[in-house]
Amino acid sequence: MKKARITAIVVVLIFTVVVVFAQTGSFGGKRTTQVQVQIRSNVRGANVYLGKLHGRTPFTFKIAPGYYTIRVSASGYSTFNGRINVSKNSYQTINITLQPLMVSVTFTSNVRGARLYLNNRPKGTTPTNLHLAPGSYTVRLEAKGYTTYQGRVNVTRSSRQTYNFRMEPAVVSVRFLSNVKGAKLYLDNKYRGAMPLNLRLTPDTYNVRVEAKGYTAYQGQVTVTPLSGQNYSFELQPSTATLNVVVPAKYLNKLVKNQKNLIRLWVDKKPMNSKGGVRNFHVTPGRHTIRITTGGVDVTRQFTFEPGAVYNLELFMDIRLRK
């Protein structure tokens, strides 16, 4: 009976030791209690390597307290290599921040030297090359004489990317004038209206043509700058020659009232008289036959006229032409 009691006590002691070992993982009083640890990262699903353990964030496991070497990696991010200290706390969370791999990005625009802003921060002038983390960025481009460009770009993990932006010229106010009121203005062969004329134009170089009846058409170019309030004036030259008829008083009949109204003039056999007599008229450039009659005088001569010139036709028993 005594032997049976001793055996029972031994069995109880052995069971107690087994239970203690199961809870502490140790013999001889040396504790090996495991604690629960969770590894998190800013990139969900990142690979976690810790000794023989492997998982993906968020990765939860049990391990004994101590220092461990850990590696966390994810596509498009720099690999994290370091050491962590697992304390004796019953539950721990360890956060790992992975840094995105930088991407080479080139920014260009049709306006060289345009100021570039990403997320409202100055980044130089175009063209420029930057190393950026993948992600979405607001873009702003500014240049004198051009409308500000605003938009957004999405930088991917591709090794090299280029973004090209087109800026539109700002519209400026321009006034066109001519010495001939109502002269017609054409820009790049497109009719824009009669002068004086105010237009809103984009800065550029334009082909100009100005036309008016009786005047030689003007053709040339104007360069509209980004500055507002510009004026362009065009001087048109008459396309015809102007003739003034001068008849000395001695050739007029003083006994006849309004003798000047009796002066008659023909150009190339075409009568040029108007109410009130002949004073001045216009002819096309070139050679013409002129005939003047008054009282008993009748003279015919030929003359050559230049465009835009002014002539006096003086009657002295002949026709004297003076320019």
Image (cartoon, rainbow, N blue to C red):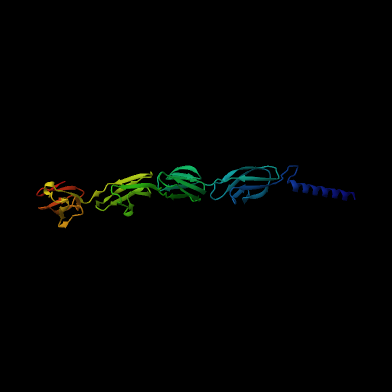
Residue that lies at the very extreme toward the right in this rendered image: 1
Image side of residue 255 versus residue 106, left or right: left
Image side of residue 78 versus residue 166, left or right: right
Image side of residue 140 versus residue 99, left or right: left
Question: Residue 185 at what x, y percent from top left?
Answer: 31, 52
Can residue 311 be seen here? The reply is yes
Question: Residue 120 at what x, y percent from top left?
Answer: 50, 44
Viewer-nearest residue: 251 or 106? 251
Viewer-nearest residue: 24 or 210? 210
Can residue 50 be seen here? The reply is no
Image side of residue 170 versus residue 276, left or right: right
Viewer-nearest residue: 29 or 71? 71
Q: Residue at x 34, y 45 (%)?
A: 231
Question: Residue 320 at what x, y percent from top left?
Answer: 12, 48
Q: Is residue 84 above or below residue 217?
A: above
Question: Residue 255 at what x, y percent from top left?
Answer: 13, 50
Q: Residue at x 83, y 49 (%)?
A: 12
